[in-house]
Image (cartoon, rainbow, N blue to C red):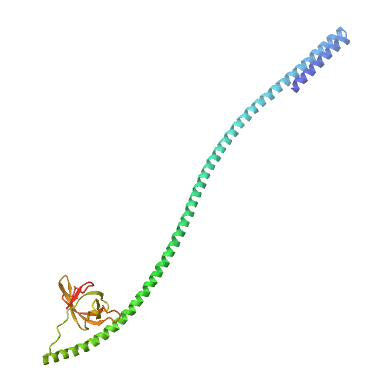
Amino acid sequence: MKNGLLIGVVVLAIGALVLAFFLITTASAKKQKIAELASTNAVYAALVEGQAKAIADVRGTLDVRDGDLKKARTEIQKLKDEAESKIADATKELTGTVAARDAALDKAKKDIVAAQELLAQEQVAHKATKDTVAEREATIKAKETEISTLNATVKDWQTKEKAATVVAERYKSMLLANKISVEPEKKFHGNVLVVNREQDFLILDLGADDSVPVGTKLEVVRDNHLVGKVTVQKLVPDNNQLSIATVDSLVTPADTVREGDAVKN
């Protein structure tokens, strides 16, 4: 635009010079001025042509730069699009990872709560089991004390039974020698309630209420078959329906007396 203005100024200047020339100079001078003007015009024409060429070169350079700028903008936009795409993919992946970790964390929290509840239940059950074990240990200890007492009693019975057997045999001999009649033997029918294999004694459901005497010999019967023979050793003081007996013999050693077997004389 500046070049066009410059050209217009030059043209106006030339016109002014020409007009002044015609007004002031004579015909000869006019020729000389025309020649000078032609020369000046040629110079200015060359200048204008140079300026036009320079402007064309600048425009070409600007067109090239515009092309480069467009290309650069295209490349930048492409890079921007690729970067935004990668950011979107990374964001999506990160979001998925965070969601998965949150889900895993929630599951872990739930598992911890469930484990804590299970632990509390197990602690309660353990305490209950511990209390039950303590009660059973106390019961076992009491039973052991009772068994020890029974063992001592059985030994005492055995000692007294031996002495009573001797006296009974003597009494029986005296009766036979003097032919004194003896009251017919009373019949007893009962069952074996308890078998203590460690202490080797039995508890029968025959006692003082049945008038069973200590030393009575009884047969042990199961399914109408003789299993063995036992002897009543003592009547239980606190229960008039029970007595304690020991095994005298077995028909078959492998077939021992069992709970529920019948006893009779």
- Asked if residue 10 lies left or right of residue 133, the reply is right
- Asked if residue 225 lies left or right of residue 132, the reply is left
Q: Quadrant of the N terminus?
A: top right
Residue 232 percent coordinates (x, y): 22, 81
Residue 212 percent coordinates (x, y): 21, 81
* Residue at (72, 20) in percent of width and height: 52
For residue 36, above or below residue 146: above
Q: Quadrant of residue 62?
A: top right
* Residue at (15, 72) in percent of width and height: 225
Residue 161 percent coordinates (x, y): 22, 86
> In this view of the protein, can residue 178 be seen by the observer?
yes
Residue 100 percent coordinates (x, y): 49, 47
Residue nearest the viewer, comparing 23 with 149: 149
Q: In which quarter of the image is the C terminus?
A: bottom left
Residue nearest the viewer, comparing 222 with 100: 222
* Residue at (77, 20) in percent of width and height: 5
Residue nearest the viewer, comparing 58 with 122: 122
Number of numbered markers = 0
Q: Quadrant of residue 207?
A: bottom left
